[in-house]
Amino acid sequence: MKGKILETLAGFIVLAIAGALLTYAYVHEKKGDLKGYPLFVRFEKADGLVVGSDVKVSGIKIGRVETLSMDKDTFEAVAKIILQEGVYIPKDSSAAIVSESLLGGKYLSLTPGGDDEHLKPGSQIHRAQSSIVLESLLSQMVFNNKDSKKETKKDHEDE
């Protein structure tokens, strides 16, 4: 009987610690604290990019993705991003959706251009590279290898 009480007590302690950690994470989440200005980016595909994804320049976080929507006329993905105050991006900058790692999520990488004029709040980054879907690259590589092996076999049989 004493063993069951101790096991139950240990379970409650574990649950209390887990609850405290979740509460701490929720309270200290900084997604809403970023003050800055909005920019817009249009993509053919925004696979893997989600609301809250980081926006980085040279690997340094300078903002986040605020919203993702679809333009009903062009069927393009439209990302509204918020950049930190004091970080100004040249007009001829480009944006690309890149992977953090093979298994990780994706973020929006900005490559600053050389223009002297900066993008104003609410303007659009015109150069954008859509997300590269790893699965399609892998299947393309697999199927291309199979096709090239068949062609090689045919070439050898013809000789």
Image (cartoon, grey):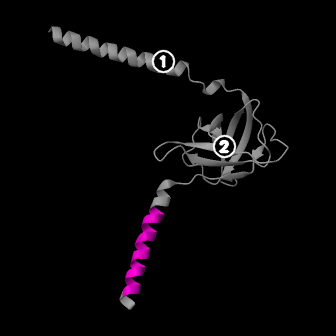
Q: Relative to 59, is 137 above or below? A: below
Mark 2 crowdedness (10 Å alpha carbons): few <14, some 14-19, many ≥20 = many
9 magenta-colored: no
Q: Determine whether the residue tagged by mark 2 lies in a helix, strand or loop.
A: strand
Instruction: Examine the structure image and report whether residue 155 is included in the region drawn in magenta.
Output: yes
State the extent of the magenta-drawn residues as a range: 139-156
Q: Residue at x 66, y 43 (%)?
A: 79
Disc 1 to disc 2, C-alpha distance = 30 Å
Image quadrant where one finds the C terminus: bottom left
Write down the residue under mark 2.
Answer: 79
Mark 1 secondary-structure assignment: helix
At horizontal 68% and vertical 51% (from top left) the residue drawn is 128
Residue 99 in the image, given as x and y percentages of width and height: 54, 46
Q: Residues within 10 Å of mark 1 (few under 14, many from 20)?
A: few
Q: Pick the quarter of the image with the N terminus.
A: top left
Identify the amino acid type marked 2. Ala
Where does label 1 land, which residue? 23
Q: Is residue 25 above or below residue 117?
A: above
Magenta region, main secondary structure: helix
Please give the name of the residue rendered at 46% of the width and 59% of the height, measured from the top-left corner.
138
First in sequence, mark 1 or 2: give its number.
1
Looking at the image, can residue 50 be seen?
yes
Q: Amino acid at mark 1?
A: Thr
